[in-house]
Amino acid sequence: MKLYYTPGTCALADHIALEWIGEPFDAQLVSREERKQPAYLAINPAGAVPALIIGDWILTQNVAILNYLADKHPESKLGGDGTPESRAVVNQWLSLVNSDVHPLFKVWFGSVAFLDQDDIDTVQANTRVQLRTLFERIDRQLDGKQWVTGTRSIVDPYLFVVLRWARALKVDLKGLDHLHAFFDRMEADPGVRKALEAQGLK
Ligand SMILES: N[C@@H](CCC(=O)N[C@@H](CS)C(=O)NCC(=O)O)C(=O)O
């Protein structure tokens, strides 16, 4: 099994999940430039990471990969406790991170490519507000919990990744103490540390 990643991207979520699961895998670094080259486009025509190769099967899209890993390893309980309800809750929060939080960063970075500075400032200010609102919701969910759904799941590494981005961009996370405590716990987690070190981020 081979995971294609660019350091610090959303592929870090899969990297952490693989460390938690403990199945042997190769981590293959792909640079920004390499993502646009024919060799990588043959793996993922979108030129994006993550991509997971299992034998001669290629799987792309972060939530598909995370769900596949959880389903392949039910003993990890990263997809819930086996009930449809717990699975639905995992997917509910996974969707929030993947479909609501993550795309705001695409807007943030994408704006730089085609807008003038005034418009970039407006877009980014608006994006900060929307991110704050979403992180407030996740902070409330984490009240009294170590993990987003109550037990460790594939949601947590993806949340950790977008939180790293938010902190790097100095999104206002003031007072979101459950979120900060979650981030600190994740940073101290052995599997997370191993993935961060492997990606040269520690
Ligand atoms: N919908 C894709 C998006 C993946 C994605 O946005 N990957 C980013 C890194 S976090 C990337 O490789 N972007 C490069 C590009 O799209 O050109 C997924 O969820 O896997």
Image (cartoon, grey):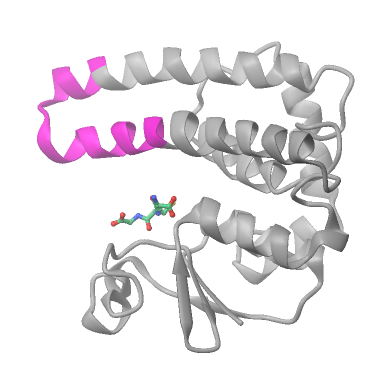
Between 31 and 140, the residue placed more toward the observer is 140
Residue at image coords 68%, 48%: 157
How many numbered marks does the figure carry?
0
Residue found 33% across the figure and 65% down from its top:
32
Q: In this picture, is 186 found above or below 108?
A: below
Using the rendered view, name the quadrant where residue 139 is placed: top right
At horizontal 54% and vertical 51% (from top left) the residue drawn is 63
Of the 4 image quadrants, the one containing the N terminus is bottom right
- Determine which quarter of the picture holds residue 91: top right
Kindly tell me whether residue 121 is visible in this rendering. Answer: yes
User: Does residue 14 appear to the left or right of 7 in the view shown?
Assistant: right
The single residue placed furthest to the bottom in the displayed view is: 55
- Left or right: 4 as drawn, with respect to 18: left
What x and y, as percent, mark residue 84?
A: 75, 40
- Front-lying residue, 54 or 176: 54
Tell me, yes or no, whether the highlighted magenta stretch contains residue 119: yes
In depth, the one of 145 and 183 nearer the eye is 145
- Please determine whether, in this image, residue 129 is positioned above or below residue 64: above
Against 117, residue 29 (above or below) is: below
Return the x and y of residue 22 as percentages of the image width and height.
81, 72
Q: Write the residue at 21% across / 32% down.
A: 111
From the image, give the main secondary structure of the stretch colored magenta: helix
Q: Which residues are magenta?
A: 103-122
Most foreground residue, 151 or 40: 151
Residue 196 appears in the figure:
no
Residue 95 location, x and y as percent? 54, 35
Residue 201 within the segment the image draws in magenta: no
Q: Is residue 160 left or right of residue 100?
A: right
The quadrant the C terminus occupies is: bottom right
